[in-house]
Image (cartoon, grey):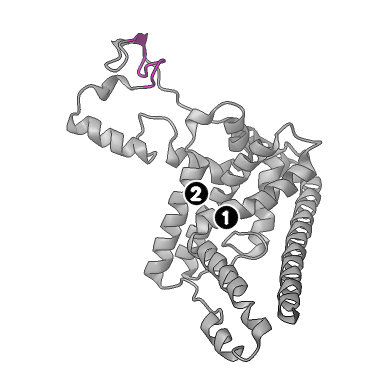
Amino acid sequence: MFQKVKEKAHEISLRQQHGNFNVQKSSEHNTCAHCQTTYEGYICPQCGQRSDSAHFTPNVVLHKMMDSVGFDERGNRSILRTMRDLLWRPGYMIRDYLGGHSAAYFQPFKLLLLLVLAYTLLAYLFGVLPEDTGEDVSNLSASWKNDDTKQKLIPLITTTKAIIIWLGNNMAYSIILQNFVIVTAMWKVYRKRALYSWTETFIAQMYICCQFMILAIVLLLVTWKYHEPGILPYLVPSWMVIAVMIYDFYQLYDEQRIWPALWRVIKVNLWIILMYALLLALFILVVALYMTIVIAANEA
């Protein structure tokens, strides 16, 4: 029984490792309407214009519209293929993308923006967007009106609150900014095991964020509930974050066993906690220096 399960799992793993790219080929000779280059195929090798760009028939316009968002079955960078592979074979898909098959998949930054937009619209329609529970700065200003030192803190608090609100209202950019910490932790843990640079690790992490946004949308549709992000900017429960990270790292970094992948996921999260702690300490230091300068100015 156990042997059959093991063989089936190995068979599934082999299927996941091989992507289906369906490259569109043609032996037709064309002359580019833009740069007059004569070439074989659908796309001009000099300027990148397609052979069907000369005549804007309704069919051509429809395909161009669908291709711009990754839904044209004739084009590359398919958004449906990308989303399917992010759920079925995420680590292997990212390895394919970094290994040279970038034309087969939708770009991670565009995909993240589209998924965040879809999630926000659904959350708005369901009425489950989180409310701002922060204290109004004007209330603080009124309560501190007799304390000159505290009054001088109002601009700092206002700026900090404005940044937090902006990050909350711009989820995609908030995720990208937080990824600098997450990617550094991933690169730190895996730098001796994988050949990926910090930049390539950043691209990989952007796809992982897209994967979590897909799962968050599915979870929202099932539960009709907004899940507050934890230490990582993913809108899914913490247990799901750990499970998905193990699954992704197992494929992406060619782990041979689950337990080493689990240990490295734990190490990545520990590094993330450490770096967030250092950033918090730096913020406290800045506030302390600011207070010191304010108090010194009042005494003078």
Q: Secondary structure at mark 2?
A: helix
Could you say which is closer to the camera, residue 220 or residue 203? 203
Tell me the residue that label 2 is attached to. Answer: 112
Q: Which quarter of the rendering shows the C terminus?
A: bottom right
Coordinates of residue 20 in the picture (x, y in percent)? 51, 29
**Magenta span main SS:** loop
Q: Residue furthest left?
A: 57
Give the residue type at disc 1.
Ile
> Where does the image place residue 265, in percent across and percent down from the top left?
75, 51
Residue 222 at what x, y percent from top left?
Answer: 47, 65
Using the rendered view, name the quadrant where residue 142 is placed.
Answer: bottom right
The one of 153 and 273 positioned closer to us in this rendering: 153
- Circle 1/circle 2 CB separation < 8 Å: yes
Q: From the image, tell me which residue sits under label 1.
A: 175
The mark that comes first in sequence, 1 or 2, is 2
Front residue of 219/47: it is 47
Res. 96 image quadrant: top right
Q: Amino acid at mark 2?
A: Leu
Q: Is residue 153 above or below residue 176?
A: below
- Give the residues drawn in magenta, as a range: 37-48
> Is residue 151 positioned above or below 236 on the image?
below
Tell me where residue 128 sits by quadrant: bottom left
Task: Say left or right for 85 vs 26.
Answer: right
Q: CA distance from mark 1 to mark 2?
A: 9 Å
Query: Would residue 88 be found to the left or right of residue 241 on screen?
Result: left
Task: Let me know if residue 257 appears in the view.
Answer: no
Label 2 neighbourhood size at 10 Å, few (<14), some (14-19), many (20+)?
many
